[in-house]
Image: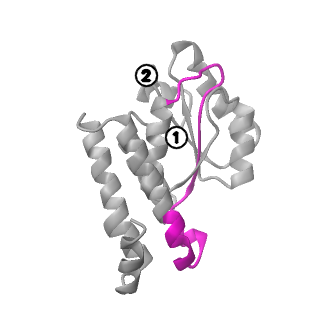
């Protein structure tokens, strides 16, 4: 990759084309194969790492961060929950789709989510709950958003989470997989007039 990117740039291919027609399509293929069970988490994470390195190498050739990233997403597993695999898959897919992701890790309080949203001017926040006992933290995240009058998309997922649950707590969207998370965010941001 370290050799092929400079070669592509030397050949006159724009960084945006390298990202959209090369890297992003590669990550989309990784996402499809992961959803089909043909790839496993370590392979997805390795592909995400390559994408991150490529974006870093291309950053000097891209004029602004607004051109480099499609949006900013804060991700974490809700308070009381230490499971991270689902969240990490979503993060890998989002990074592969050119979103800047702020990973807060596991056991994140609603207050910490909103603080990170404000500090990073985030477009969306993703809260994962993998246990029925922590599911109500997603409702508390929505409450914290409203209390702080914070204009951010609240997206949720996790094993016990359903679309009906997300609607009942006034969340903005439900995601069942990493690929679904990217499609959901694309759709929501397009509807709001983001690029």
The one nearer the camera, 189 or 47, is 47
Image position, residue 159 (x, y; %): 43, 22
Q: Where does label 2 land, which residue?
A: 159
Residue 129 located left or right of residue 177: right
Graded by Cα atoms within 10 Å as few (under 14), some (14 to 19) or many (20 or more), the crowding at tag 1 reads: some
The one nearer the camera, 123 or 142, is 123
The one nearer the camera, 12 or 148, is 12
User: Where 143 falls versus 124 (above or below)?
Assistant: above
The first of marks 2 and 1 along the sequence is 2
Secondary structure category for the residue under label 1 = loop
The residue drawn where x is 45% and y is 31% is: 86
User: Where 2 falls versus 88 (above or below)?
Assistant: below
Image position, residue 57 (x, y; %): 51, 69
Secondary structure category for the residue under label 2 = loop
The one nearer the camera, 144 or 19, is 19
- Whether residue 75 appears in this view of the structure is yes
- The boundaries of the magenta stretch are 55-84
Q: CA distance from mark 2 to mark 1?
A: 18 Å
Q: Are marks 2 and 1 in contact (CB under 8 Å)?
A: no
Q: Is residue 145 magenta?
A: no
Q: Is residue 56 magenta?
A: yes
Image position, residue 128 (x, y; %): 53, 30
Image position, residue 161 (x, y; %): 46, 24
- Whether residue 191 appears in this view of the structure is no
């Amino acid at each position: 990759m370290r050799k092929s990117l400079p070669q592509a740039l030397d050949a006159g291919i724009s960084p945006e084309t390298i990202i959209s027609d090369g890297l992003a399509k590669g990550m989309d293929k990784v996402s499809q194969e992961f959803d089909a069970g043909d790839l496993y988490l370590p392979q997805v994470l390795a592909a995400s790492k390559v994408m991150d390195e490529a974006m870093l190498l291309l950053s000097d050739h891209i004029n602004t961060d607004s051109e480099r990233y499609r949006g900013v997403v804060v991700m974490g597993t809700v308070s009381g929950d230490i499971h991270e695999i689902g969240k990490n898959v979503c993060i890998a897919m989002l990074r592969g789709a050119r979103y800047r992701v702020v990973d807060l890790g596991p056991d994140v309080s609603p207050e910490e989510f909103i603080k990170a949203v404000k500090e990073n001017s985030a477009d969306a926040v993703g809260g994962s709950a993998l246990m029925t006992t922590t599911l109500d933290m997603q409702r508390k995240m929505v409450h914290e958003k409203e209390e702080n009058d914070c204009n951010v998309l609240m997206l949720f997922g996790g094993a016990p989470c359903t679309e009906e649950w997300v609607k009942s707590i006034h969340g903005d969207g439900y995601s069942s997989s990493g690929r679904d998370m990217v499609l959901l965010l694309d759709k929501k941001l397009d509807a709001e007039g983001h690029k």
